[in-house]
Amino acid sequence: MPKATETLLEIDLDALGHNFRYLKSKLKDTTKLLGVVKAYGYGSDAVEIAKELQHLGIDYLAVAYVKEGVMLRNSGITVPILVLHPQAVNLEILIDHCLEPNLYSKLVLDQFILASEKKDQKDYPIHIKFNTGLNRLGFLEKDIASITDKLNTTNSVRVRSIFSHLAASEDLLERTFSLDQIASYNSICEQYLQLSDEKPMFHMCNTSGILNYPEAHFDMVRSGIGLYGYGNSDEHSKELIPVVTLKSVISQIHHIEKGATVGYNRAYTIKNEWEAQSIATIPIGHADGISRAYGNGKGWVTINGQKASIVGNVCMDMIMVNCTDISCREGDEVILFGRSQTAEILSQSVQSISYELITAISQRVKRIIVKK
Ligand SMILES: *Cc1c(COP(=O)(O)O)cnc(C)c1O
């Protein structure tokens, strides 16, 4: 890649292909893979990621909201798209775009049946979610009979899948809890099959579920973070390649003498024990997704292979970093995170997680697609 001359988010589709193949290698041939492309493809570019996943042969995609699914359909994505959290007000738009809803409560199931009848649908694919311990969205085990009774009153919808979600699949200290969730889910699936004539797909695992609970792969698994190159543990992350690299450039370098301060609220002082320090200004700030939490020495960037810590407060459009001991010049490339300084490591410096850091990169940052 040529060196960055402005702030850029590089999206490496070859890395996506590697992660796709790695996750597939963990599955039986008969297990389907759903790629999660919500939140702009975890902060990258949902359309480019979805197109590449479609090209690689992904079985299903998922987004959180209807609007995200509409964007994919309008860009020519044809694989089935599960909408994880549809709102009542958007159900007809969802049908108009051949998106498939997660129906997680009696209210939203009733609302969706009304919408599909109004639009004269027959066997419209729906997905029913069960809450097995995350306590976020989903029916309970005791609701099964009322769901199948309700579904027997209409032919406007047909259940494509019954699914659930693990609460702590990445945390091996919570193994007992996860195994209990898997057992509850198995019991829900068995009861459902007894009351229904058709066999829907079953799925429960997110990325860490795929890697830690092979016994819970069922008919399909759902991966987000793994496809983007993060495995929630050193052991798994080392097999994956981060898809996005956030780069910028040094706009200006100041040589600042002792006693002076840097940035808003004079949060950083060149202490008396130093004669002077070199401070580089970088054109990326909290409006681009580098939150103020990374300021005041918590976060860092990499310049010519060396770490430069962020000094003072993160501004809206800029950060200042200490480059005193680094051989660098105005115009040099700066790496915020990528393959070696990963988003996982940087996010840990502020007690956050890779998910939060990568999805925060705002739409102001230019996206560049890399593919050999
Ligand atoms: C976001 C999401 C996923 C993907 O989780 P990862 O940990 O990123 O693999 C899977 N299932 C549901 C229901 C989700 O909301």
Image (spheres, helix red, strand yellow):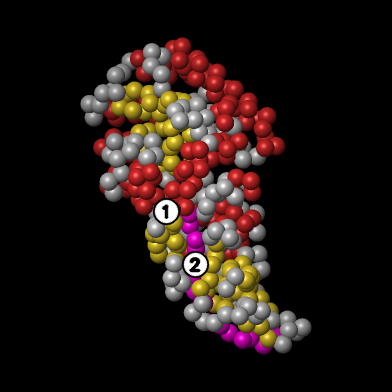
The residue segment tinted magenta is 243-262
Tag on residue 50?
Answer: none
In the visual, does 157 lie left or right of 314? left
Name the element at disc 2: strand
Specify whether residue 259 is painted magenta: yes
Q: Which residue is mark 1?
A: 13
Residue 61 image offset from top left, x and y in percent: 39, 40
User: Is disc 2 surrounded by few (<14), some (14 to 19) or many (20+) residues within 10 Å?
Assistant: many
Where residue 56 sits in the image (x, y, percent)? 38, 43
Residue at image x 41%, y 14%? 196
Identify the residue at horizontal 38%, vertical 26% (top origin): 160
**Rendered image quadrant of residue 29:** top left
Query: Do we see residue 181 in this rendering?
Result: yes
Tell me where residue 69 sits by quadrant: top left
Query: What separation in Å lies between label 1 and label 2 (alpha carbons)?
Result: 17 Å
**Mark 1 sits near ligand 1, with its Cβ under 8 Å away:** no
Q: Which residue is found at the position 49% from the left and 30% from the top?
A: 28
Location of residue 21 in the rendering, given as x and y in whole percent from the top left corner: 47, 43
Q: Is residue 199 above or below residue 169?
A: above
Which residue is at the front of the view, 356 or 304?
304
Is 20 positioned to the left or the right of 296 in the image?
left
Three-letter amino acid code at the position of disc 1 = Leu
**Residue 363 x %, y %:** 41, 60
Residue 150 as seen in the image, left or right of residue 216: left
Q: Which residue is mark 2?
A: 247
